[in-house]
């Protein structure tokens, strides 16, 4: 522990900080979603400064909001959102998340490459394409996880256990050195080698 002591935040100040954090998080998420609404609909063209600012800060701000949600839920300040994210139904999907992240660009590129006609931009068509990409990515991620990720994770755990078994046991702790008094010079004794008779 360091020499400096941490000041404990009072409960009322902590609650105010949590509320402020959630307000900033939700406000930022809503702003990031709704700011480019008119740009995407073609109703308004963004200026150079607005486009550069949104392109530079939108992903960082989105990641910061997700980090706040994770930290708040892990410290018990998530409320109903923590209960929703803690459901057991998310566990299979969370185990496939990395594989899904790796294969989804390949699935999207393959689906777009073999398509023989152009997209008809409607909500139904986009929902169908999104569902199609998600299901194909999920199947490919499951195969990739079962064939590569899970066996290597098991192999890593097995190697770690064997290396831990071969490791020599830690040495026994040394006996504690008796405490030396601070004023041992005042309570010492004379050395007979320096007696006046021998000098």
Image (tube, grey):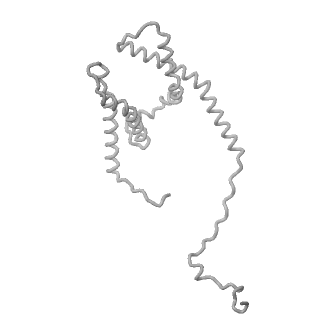
Query: Residue at the location (63% across, 71% down)?
Result: 178
- Identity of the residue furthest to the bottom in this view: 197
- Identity of the residue furthest to the top in this view: 116
Give the camera-side residue of 34 and 71: 34
- Identity of the residue furthest to the front in this view: 48
Give the camera-side residue of 126 and 9: 126
Task: Say left or right for 170 vs 186.
Answer: right
Q: Position of residue 187 (x, y in %)?
A: 60, 82
Q: Position of residue 165 (x, y in %)?
A: 70, 44
- Kindly indicate the quadrant of the structure image that contains residue 152: top right
Question: Residue 166, relative to residue 158: is it above or below?
Answer: below
Query: Residue at the location (35% across, 49% down)?
Result: 14
- Kindly indicate the quadrant of the structure image that contains residue 87: top left
Instruction: Classify the position of the C terminus by image quarter.
Output: bottom right
Question: Residue 188, relative to residue 27: is it above or below?
Answer: below
Task: Say left or right for 2 vs 121.
Answer: right
Query: Residue at the location (58% across, 21% down)?
Result: 143
Q: Position of residue 183 (x, y in %)?
A: 56, 78
Query: Residue at the location (29% across, 25% down)?
Result: 46
Give the camera-side residue of 115 and 177: 115
Task: Say left or right for 173 vs 122.
Answer: right
Question: Residue 91, relative to residue 74: is it above or below?
Answer: above
Q: Position of residue 175 (x, y in %)?
A: 67, 65
Question: Residue 1, relative to residue 57: is it above or below?
Answer: below
């Amino acid at each position: 522990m360091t020499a400096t002591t941490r000041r404990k935040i009072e409960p009322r100040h902590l609650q105010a900080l949590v509320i402020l954090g959630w307000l900033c998080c939700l406000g930022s998420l809503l702003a990031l979603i709704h700011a480019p609404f008119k740009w995407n609909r073609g109703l308004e063209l963004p200026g150079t400064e607005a486009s550069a600012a949104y392109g530079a800060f939108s992903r960082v701000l989105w990641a910061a909001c997700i980090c706040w949600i994770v930290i708040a839920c892990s410290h018990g300040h998530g409320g109903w959102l923590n209960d929703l994210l803690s459901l057991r139904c998310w566990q299979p999907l969370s185990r496939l998340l990395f594989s899904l992240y790796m294969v989804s660009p390949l699935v999207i590129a393959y689906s777009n490459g073999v398509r023989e006609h152009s997209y008809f931009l409607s909500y139904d068509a986009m929902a169908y394409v999104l569902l199609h990409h998600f299901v194909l990515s999920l199947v490919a991620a499951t195969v990739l996880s079962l064939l590569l990720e899970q066996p290597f994770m098991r192999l890593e755990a097995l190697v770690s256990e064997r290396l831990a078994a071969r490791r020599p046991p830690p040495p026994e702790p040394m006996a504690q050195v008796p405490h030396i008094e601070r004023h041992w010079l005042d309570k010492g004794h004379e050395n007979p080698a320096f007696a006046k008779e021998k000098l």
